[in-house]
Amino acid sequence: MDKKLIHSNNILDGSKYATDFDYRMHHYCINKFKKILLESNCLELGCYYGEMTKKLSRICKNVTALDFDSKCVNETKKACKKTKNVIVKKGDFFTYNNYKHHDVIYFSHSLEHIKNDRKLLDQIFNQMKKDSVLITIVPNGYSLSRQIAVKMGLIPSELVVTDFEKKIGHYRTYDMKTFQSLFKEHDFSHFEFGGIMPKIFSNNQFDKCLKDGIINDSFLDALYQLSNKFSEICSSIYSICRK
């Protein structure tokens, strides 16, 4: 990531960098990609404070967590200090030269933080070994909650980078079309695109509804099961690209 993260979790007008809903989404991401991740030698690009790193370590053979931010690296080391199959490294995604050593590259909610996303994807593709897999997940500009925000006049358009998103280091907002085009420029042998979790509320609204008992984990499970049917309005969109 190019911009230094603001580490306070209360960034702007009560909005959080990492919400409870974000952490609950980890479970659904693991569920979605489990067959690919299982017993793999995995590289995690962007580890934040290590919550997903720990989850990856439970199903992957080995996990290398790479982040340019010193605080994220230190917090992930603390989170994973008892986890023997995790290595945490401080480094730049552009200068990392060991992409070829990994079976799976797990790139979740970091690409939107990269100023030159095409250049980075070129580098990753060129270094990936044959049959390795790149899993990339980004926030979806056309999630239902974001479309509702436009209709309410809260944001001018779906793909705008909001003040909050600028504060946390986003350079752009993807929709499915622009997201797919990044990967289809490369000669991957297999592509899969989709969405994870139809997003009917904002993250903070999900947190409040869960706290107040309006919705529960069973509701989220049911919502997740609708991901394939309503991928265009999901919270996140993903790509699975095999070289």
Image (cartoon, rainbow, N blue to C red):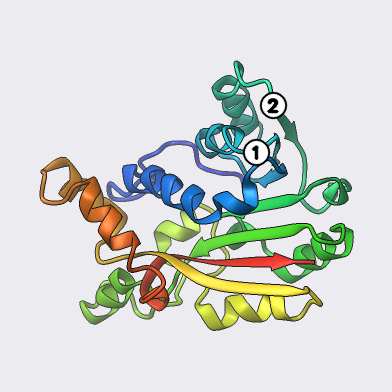
Residue 2 in view of the camera: no
> At which x and y percent is residue 104?
72, 51
Pick whichever of labels 2 and 1 is earlier in the sequence. Answer: 1
- Of all residues, the one furthest to the top in this rendering is 82
Residue located 78% across and 73% down the image: 188
Residue located 88% across and 64% down the image: 126
Measure how far apart labels 2 and 1 are at the Cα level. 8 Å
> On the image, which quarter does residue 190 sit in?
bottom right
Q: Are marks 2 and 1 in contact (CB under 8 Å)?
A: yes
Would residue 217 be found to the left or right of residue 87 on screen?
left
> At which x and y percent is residue 165?
45, 59
> At which x and y percent is residue 9?
39, 38
Residue 119 in view of the camera: yes
Residue located 59% across and 52% down the image: 35
Q: How many marks?
A: 2
Foreground pick, 11 / 98? 98
Foreground pick, 15 / 110? 110
Q: Are there few (<14), some (14-19), or many (20+) residues within 10 Å of tag 1? A: many
Q: Are there few (<14), some (14-19), or many (20+) residues within 10 Å of tag 2? A: some
> On the image, which quarter does residue 181 sit in?
bottom right
Foreground pick, 232 / 41? 41
Foreground pick, 220 / 1? 220
Would residue 127 be found to the left or right of residue 115 on screen?
right
Residue receiving disc 2: 85
Q: Quadrant of the C terminus?
A: bottom right
Please, what is the three-letter code of the amino acid marked with disc 1? Cys
Residue receiving disc 1: 60
